[in-house]
Image: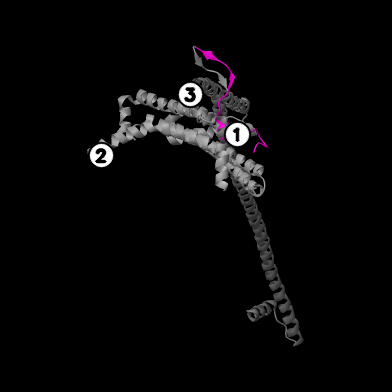
Amino acid sequence: MNLFMPSVALDPIHQFKVTKWLDFNVGGIDLSFTNASGFMALGVILTIAFFGVAASKGQLVPSRLQSLAEIGYGFVADMVRGAAGEEGLKFFPFVFTLFFFLFFANMIGMVPYAFTTTSHIIVTGALALLVISIVIGFGFYKNGFKFLKLFAPSGAPWPIYIILIPIEIISFFARPLTLSLRLFANMLAGHIMLKLFAGFAVGLIAAGGAYIIIAPFAFAMGVALNALELLVAGLQAYVFAILTCVYLNDAFHPAH
Amino acid sequence: MLIALLAETAAHGSEHLAEDTPPPFPPFETWHMPSQLFWLAVLFGILYLTMSRVILPKLSDTLEKRSDRIASDLDQAARLNDQATEAQQALELRIAQAKNKARETADKARAKMDAEMAAETSRVDAEIEKKLDAADERIASLRVEAMKNVEQIAIETADTIVGRFGVSASKSELKKAVTAALE
């Protein structure tokens, strides 16, 4: 069983393990720079590098790289405009940052041996809470107490409100939960599956005999899953960003 | 059998990590959470500031410049097109004017020639008339003269004929007789 890799690497959970790279303590709180922070920093650096280089020249006739950056810009701008309207563009830089932060983090996670920062609930949860705080904060700032109309959609007969308002409140506060869990669970489950099938292939070969015949199928499954996960990595970043836009739309127009 | 092996693979890692206590699930461990939050805040903040202050303005600037440029190019094209249309219209106008002028000149020349021809014709006609009149006059005078001669010849002939018969007649009698015969 330990023929091809150290056995510890076969553990599908091992890839999510946080290890300290640099000890860093502030007031008794452990703020060490870990592998999670390292790969997050890598994603941020790559994002900045990519857009920095692509946008630096600002050519009238764009190069391929600049075209790509402009497509990204247009993509996110259309997403914000479509889901939150023209005024939603106020939050365009935030959604843009969020989308590409998640996109690069997810994509880096697809590289073998890389750490997937978005596979930790604390990260996705913090981002979801940030989104919902912005929605609540801006909602009250812009609409005052009319923002509470969000929980009482107009046009229903009054007895319905007895049921409707609690449902709306619950659904609103479920948003950060679902938003963070969706991304977290997708990344976690996907990477576990990848590891499992890759490990399974290795295990089959190690088991020897007739199992070796099945090993290529397990490996092929791993390859197919890799393609699927690549899709999921992009899609989940998109889903997170577009749901952010949808929630922001509520802050602009609370009375649906 | 396969599923069992898959399950075994899945469970395998945890076996040796800890035999008695359940293995820690990293995403739910708490020790790294403050550090994760801290670095997320720092890094997301850096990314947000870089994007919103530097990169996005630059990108939107470029896009705006491009759309401005396209709009101004289209404007210029429209303007040039208008100019071309104008020039064409002016050209057509000038061609029409030139045609009119040519027609006028031709008409004038034709009229002048007609007038000249008419004048010449009438002059020649008058001349011919005059000559004809003169000729008529001459013919008339010649005829009178010829008639006179005829009378004279007739008288002389009559005289000779009468003389052959041995009759002499006076001149006045002969003349009377000839005149009567002629009439």
Front in this rendered view, residue A19 or B116: A19
Is residue A245 toward the left or the right of residue B152 in the image? left
| Residue A88 place in picture, x, y as percent | 43, 30
Closer to the camera in the image, A36 or A77: A36
The quarter of the picture where the N terminus of chain A appears is: top right
* Residue designated by label 1: A68
Task: Identify the secondary structure beneath mark 3.
Answer: loop
Q: To which chain does the residue with label 3 belong?
A: B
Farthest residue toward the top?
Answer: A27
Q: Residues within 10 Å of mark 2 (few under 14, many from 20)?
A: few
Local crowd size for mark 1, using a 10 Å CA cut-off: few (<14), some (14–19), many (≥20): some
Question: Mark 3: which amino acid?
Answer: Thr
The reply to whether the magenta stretch includes residue A15 is yes
For mark 2, name the chain.
Answer: A
Residue B81 lies in the magenta stretch: no
The residue singled out by tag 2 in the image is A160
Q: Of the residues shown, which amino acid type is indicated by label 2?
A: Ile
Range shown magenta: A1-26
Q: Percent x, y for residue B144?
A: 67, 70
Q: Nearer the viewer, residue B114 or B149?
A: B114
The residue where tag 3 is placed is B30
Return the x and y of residue A81 as percentages of the image width and height.
46, 34
Is residue B82 visible in the rendered structure shown here?
no
Q: Are callouts 3 and 2 both on one chain?
A: no
| Tag nearer the camera, 1 or 3 | 3
Q: CA distance from mark 2 to mark 1?
A: 49 Å
Position of A123 relative to A228 (above/below): above
